Amino acid sequence: MDRKETPSPVDATPPPASSKEVEPPRPFSIYTRNEKWMIVSLIAFAGLFSPLTANIYFPAIPTLVQEFHKSTELINLTVTMYIIFQGLAPMLWGTLSDQWGRRPIYMACLFVLAMSCVGLALVPTNAYWLLMLLRCFQAAGSASTIAIGAGVIGDISTRAERGGFYGLFTMGPLVGPAIGPVIGGLLAGHLGWRSIFWFLCIAASVCFIILVLFLPETLRLLVGDGSIRPPLIYRPIIPIVGRKVHQQRPDPAEETRKKFQNPLLLLIQIDILNLLCISALACAVFYSVLAPISTLLMETYPFLDETKIGLCFLGIGFGMVIGSSITGRFLDRQYAAIKAQHLKKRRNSGTSETEGGNNDVDLSFPIERARLQWIPIPILLMVGCSAGYGWCIQKGVNLAAPLILQVLVGLLAISAMNPVQTLMIDLVPKQSSSVTACNNLVRCTLSAVIVALVDVIIQAVGTGWTYVIMSGMSLACLPLVFVAIKIGPRCREKRRNATHS
């Protein structure tokens, strides 16, 4: 008779769980959502300086004409040179931050900005050439904070949450055009034009100290998901976020340090170039409204003085801040809805639902549609608002009408630009600063051309028809949006194959 065997203690022990059961998937970033919001708030403060430094200077131009004994055209040339370097500098600083870290490049930019402001505050009035040179250095220091900030967002956020973070981040840069002329006018009128640059020096120094104290390094080449302790220079003095960081081995999925990557190569990517054109056209229409506000309102409404005109800039800035907040939340909700539809479709077809940690593995996911599906609505509304703004100015209607339309133009312009910029970070998250620098270059170039021509066009055809022409530029964005949705998946697949070949 066979005896029933009793399993030995060793046999009774359950087999060890597989590594997949023991180790849960590593999160994309170790930072909690609240910590991410804090990091984004810090970089939004730094991003304020690019537009603030440009716009705070405008009210002092008539005074500088008298002080330096130069023509208005020559003083305006300092503005032109600022815009040029505002477009060029992020191509260097942004790309360096993609390779060598966000913190040191932030500190370098803010240091250059603060020192150039000291020079501008002390520049002698018989040294016009020095005024021009220091304005170039000022632009080189301030303009790159936006590109580096976009890189930080790419480091710490997934596609699902990136829209909201980018919406908050852009609030900093958007406050600049609104409050810059107001602050500049108050300082120049009460304390003299040199006080503008002392104010910027102090503000940049405060930002420098805050980032040194609190901002962690986020570049994934250095810190992975944030759990790898970087060298001392990359660590905040007061680590209030990521305090549970502990030394880990790098994630094999993270790249090793690469050689310097030329950001201009992004311009030959047809889908990215197409997105750059959408963003640049929307930005140019915005600046065609922003730049001539002082001249048009003063001519049309003679009862406005310089202080009241400065306050009129608050409307368009307020519109952009509100639009950025709304767009950020909407982008996250839209992404979640499209993702749910996509996963349901995959389940029905029997395909795995697994996505990468940054949602970048699934090439079939329609990220272009998730980001751009609804932006034809603000584009079409901006067409009507910009044209209506021009005719309101030409007919001299009640001041409330053009001010309300300014708010709407600001709101709609950012509602068109933010989804495009967020999508570009989605497409090349490891070069998020570089692609933002390219966006800045293209936008600044086209905007500078429009700002230079808008007065000429107004003189030739009148204010109303000028803004009809500008609204036509808005309308030109529409076919490019549908092109982006159509060609995007093929371009992503081609880029992925080139990377793995």
Image (cartoon, helix red, strand yellow):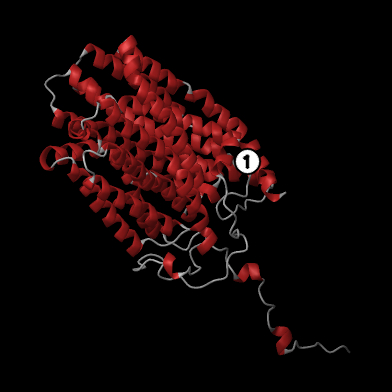
Neighbour tally class for label 1: few under 14, some 14-19, many 20 plus, Cα within 10 Å: some
What is the x, y in percent for residue 87? 43, 38
Left or right: residue 188 versus residue 246 is left
- Picture residue at 34% right of the left edge, 12% below the top: 465
Q: Which residue carries the number 1 mark?
A: 492
What is the x, y in percent for residue 336? 49, 45
Vertical relation: 257 (above or below) 466: below
Which part of the image, by quadrant, shows the N terminus? bottom right
Asked which quadrant contains residue 380, the reply is: top left
- Picture residue at 37% right of the left edge, 48% below the top: 141
Say which of 127 and 110 sits in front: 127
Whether residue 99 can be seen here: yes
Tell me which amino acid carries mark 1. Answer: Arg
Left or right: residue 143 versus residue 14 is left
- The residue positioned farthest toward the front in the image shown: 126
Say which of 21 and 478 sits in front: 478
What is the x, y in percent for residue 248? 54, 71
Say which of 261 and 247 sits in front: 261
- The residue positioned farthest toward the top in the image shown: 461
Asked which quadrant contains residue 57, the reply is: top left
Under circle 1, the secondary element is helix
Whether residue 378 can be seen here: no
Left or right: residue 247 versus residue 294 is right
